[in-house]
Structure formats: structure tokens, C-alpha cells
Image (spheres, grey):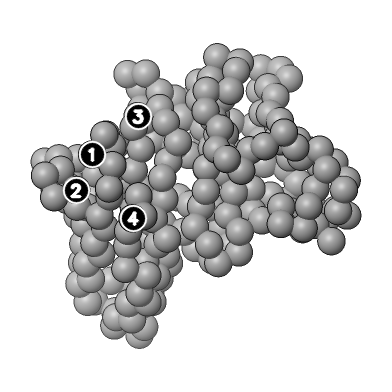
């Protein structure tokens, strides 16, 4: 069964450093998303991406964040200058969309720890 | 008012019990409804989509009441492996998913 994959599973970084989180969505899916979950809190939307551009972003997704689909398979989230409060699980999700399906499938997540 | 509200639990039930979770949502423009399951420190996994006519998948039954903006999940014959957090989730088709805080279920022997 196809699945979303994410790397790395755990990233430790120092405050102020740049990190890139990587995702490989399910191959025939057209919509891509990043969510995050701070420990003990609910899952929160960050950004959605369709047709090679951002379709929606949340208040959390400020100028420090960017997304890219550099090739036909990868979808990346970059945090330019990490803060302590960026420590969270980051989940990538993808969805087929259209007449296919509106169900979003999640990757296993990257645990980001900012020290 | 929260967009999606759930009772946080925990619900502690013995194996074999029937347990029901409820959820309300505030945005009447919501079009798609889901139950996800999340194990500790893992990703949300889609349990089932919820349709207006109600739908069943084995021991799991989901219901949607659009007029009341209310979604439910019923689990029959609980198993130890059902222990997890159950997330009520809504969206508007291709939009972001809006998550509830989740209801924790603990099934004991």
C-alpha cells in the first residue's frame, strides 16, 4: 500500500539554525500539506500546496517558513531560523483530490527539537 | 468557540464494551468529516470518512448530523488494540483539516 514517507524521523538543532524537513507524498496525489503538533496539543495546519504553489497558509506559517517541491517526488518544509517554540512533530500529508478522494494521508512525522 | 470540540476523556472501558465518542463542529461550510486515530507520538491514521447517511466499517460506526453539526463514532466489542486517541476532523474538501483535541480511549483486560 502506498504511503507518505518523511525524513529525518528526529532532528535536533540549535536555535537560529536552518532546518529542512523532507517528505515524499503518495505518487498520484495532487495536494500536499504540512501540519505540526506540539507535545500534548492538537494537530495544527501550517500550509497547503497545489499545482506548484501555496494555496493556503496559517498564521503560524510566517516568513521563517517556506515550502518547495523541487522535483516530481519530494515536498520540503524549510524553517530559516529556528526558535525554541518550533519544537514539535511535523507531519506531511497528501491527498488525491478531484473526483478521486478528499482523504488526507499522513507521514510518520519528523520530531524537531530546538535547543 | 472552538471549531471542533470533543470530550477529551479519558474513556476507560473493559474489553468487549461498546463506547461512543461525540464531536461538534462550528463551521456550517464544512463538507468532509473524518475520524482519525492517533497512537502516542505517532501520526494520525485515517479510521473512516463520515457520510450523511452514516457508515459502518466492521466494529466501527460513524454518524453525521449536519443540522446539529454533530458527528459520532461508535466502537463495538472493544479490543485492547483500540486504545488510542480518536480525532474528530472536518474540512472543506481540498482545504486544511481542522482537528479536534481528541478523545483518549483506554481499553483494559
Determine the secondary structure under disc 2.
loop
Residue B77 image point, x, y percent: 22, 70
In the image, is A11 to the left or to the right of A25?
A: right
- Going from N to C along the chain, the mark reached first, 4 or 3, is 4
Label 3 resides on the chain identified as B
Q: Nearer the viewer, mark 3 or mark 1?
A: 1
C-alpha distance separating marks 4 and 1: 13 Å
Report whether mark 2 lies on the same chain as mark 1.
yes
Q: Which mark is residue B69?
A: 2
Label 4 resides on the chain identified as B
> What residue do we see at 67% from left, 41% from top?
A6
Determine the secondary structure under disc 3.
loop
Determine the secondary structure under disc 1.
loop
Q: Which mark is residue B28?
A: 1
> What residue do we see at 68% from left, 49% from top?
A110
C-alpha distance separating marks 2 and 1: 7 Å
> What residue do we see at 28% from left, 37% from top?
B30
> What residue do we see at 19% from left, 48% from top?
B69
- Above or below, A112 against B91 in this view is below
Q: Nearer the viewer, mark 4 or mark 1?
A: 4
Q: Residues within 10 Å of mark 4 (few under 14, many from 20)?
A: few
Q: Nearer the viewer, mark 2 or mark 3?
A: 2
Q: Is residue B6 visible?
A: yes
Q: Residues within 10 Å of mark 2 (few under 14, many from 20)?
A: some
C-alpha distance separating marks 3 and 1: 13 Å
Residue on which disc 4 sits: B1
Q: Which mark is residue B93?
A: 3
Report whether mark 4 lies on the same chain as mark 3.
yes
Amino acid at each position: 500500500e502506498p504511503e507518505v514517507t518523511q525524513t529525518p524521523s528526529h532532528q535536533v538543532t540549535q536555535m537560529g539554525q536552518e532546518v529542512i524537513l523532507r517528505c515524499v507524498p503518495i505518487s498520484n496525489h495532487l495536494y500536499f500539506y504540512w501540519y505540526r503538533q506540539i507535545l500534548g496539543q492538537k494537530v495544527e495546519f501550517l500550509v497547503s500546496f497545489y499545482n506548484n504553489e501555496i494555496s493556503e497558509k496559517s498564521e503560524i506559517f510566517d516568513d521563517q517558513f517556506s515550502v518547495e517541491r523541487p522535483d516530481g517526488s519530494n515536498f520540503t518544509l524549510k524553517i530559516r531560523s529556528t526558535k525554541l517554540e518550533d519544537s514539535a512533530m511535523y507531519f506531511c500529508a497528501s491527498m488525491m483530490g478531484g473526483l478521486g478522494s478528499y482523504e488526507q494521508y499522513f507521514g510518520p512525522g519528523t520530531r524537531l527539537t530546538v535547543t | 468557540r472552538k471549531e471542533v470540540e470533543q470530550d477529551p476523556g479519558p474513556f476507560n472501558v473493559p474489553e468487549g464494551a461498546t463506547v461512543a465518542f461525540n464531536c461538534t463542529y462550528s463551521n456550517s461550510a464544512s463538507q468532509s468529516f473524518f475520524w482519525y486515530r492517533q497512537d502516542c507520538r505517532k501520526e494520525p491514521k485515517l479510521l473512516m470518512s463520515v457520510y450523511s447517511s452514516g457508515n459502518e466499517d466492521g466494529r466501527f460506526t460513524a454518524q453525521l448530523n449536519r443540522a446539529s453539526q454533530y458527528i459520532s463514532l461508535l466502537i463495538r466489542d472493544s479490543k485492547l488494540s483500540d486504545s488510542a486517541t480518536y480525532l474528530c476532523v472536518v474540512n472543506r474538501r481540498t482545504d486544511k483539516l481542522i482537528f479536534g483535541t481528541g478523545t483518549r480511549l483506554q481499553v483494559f483486560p
